[in-house]
Amino acid sequence: MKEKILTGALAALLTFGGLSTPVAADSQEILVDDVWARATIGVSRPAAVYFTLRNTGGDAVKLIGFETTIAKRAEAHRLKIDANGISTMEPAGEILLRPGNDLVFEPGGLHIMLMGLQEPLVEGDSIQLDLLFDDGGRMPVNVRVRGIAARGPRN
């Protein structure tokens, strides 16, 4: 499933509508694909969302946050493994998406953590996650919940 947003068009609409908002130099077209999450057992542990972003525009775009109603917090995290094989997870902060590049959010790497779940993620359901960009753009993304043992968007 692919979804598009013209973040610059939203900023232009707000600007010409009499509202002031920071505007990127050029509008950016962002594509999102292969969006999925694993089902959870209850709400006591966080969930994760995975997808691929593609910047088809001419300028870099900064992804600055995430919002969803299913969790108290949604943050980008990155899993790192040190020289001793010890893995740690840390917040990724703002994420720069360069023009013409793909950014993959996947198990064992960059991903979105849903913390403080309000309800379990149930296989077959869908949830909404909003991606927030530094130019004021907001992209609502439909996240398909796969089985608890899923390893990707199709398996």
Image (spheres, helix red, strand yellow):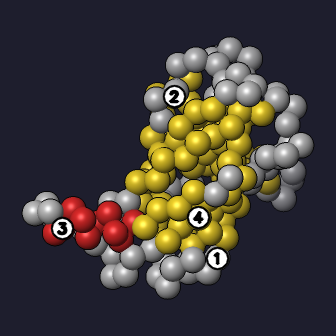
Q: Where, by quadrant of the figure, is residue 28 drawn?
A: bottom left
Residue 71 circle label: 2
Of badges 4 and 2, the one in the foreground is 4
Tag 3's secondary structure? helix
Q: Which amino acid does label 2 sit on?
A: Ala
Q: What residue type is labelled 1?
A: Asn
Q: What residue type is labelled 3?
A: Thr
Which residue position holds label 1? 101
Residue 24 against residue 58 in the figure, above or below: above
104 left or right of 128 in image: right
Q: Earlier in the sequence, mark 3 or mark 2?
A: 3
Q: Residues within 10 Å of mark 3 (few under 14, many from 20)?
A: some
Q: Earlier in the sequence, mark 4 or mark 1?
A: 4
Which residue position holds label 3? 15
Q: Which residue is drawn at 45% across and 40% down?
A: 67
Tag 1's secondary structure? loop
Q: Which of marks 4 and 3 is nearer the N terminus?
A: 3
Q: Do the residues under discs 4 and 3 have CB atoms within 8 angstroms? A: no
Q: Which of marks 1 and 3 is nearer the N terminus?
A: 3
| Mark 4 to mark 3 CA distance (whole Å) | 24 Å
Q: Which of marks 4 and 2 is nearer the N terminus?
A: 4
| Mark 1 to mark 3 CA distance (whole Å) | 28 Å
Q: Which amino acid does label 4 sit on?
A: Leu
Is residue 134 visible from the viewing direction of this image?
A: no
Which residue position holds label 4? 31
Q: Do the residues under discs 1 and 3 have CB atoms within 8 angstroms? A: no
Q: Residues within 10 Å of mark 2 (few under 14, many from 20)?
A: some
| Mark 4 to mark 2 CA distance (whole Å) | 24 Å
Q: Residue at x 78, y 33 (%)?
A: 146
Is residue 53 visible from the viewing direction of this image?
A: yes
Q: Residues within 10 Å of mark 1 (few under 14, many from 20)?
A: few
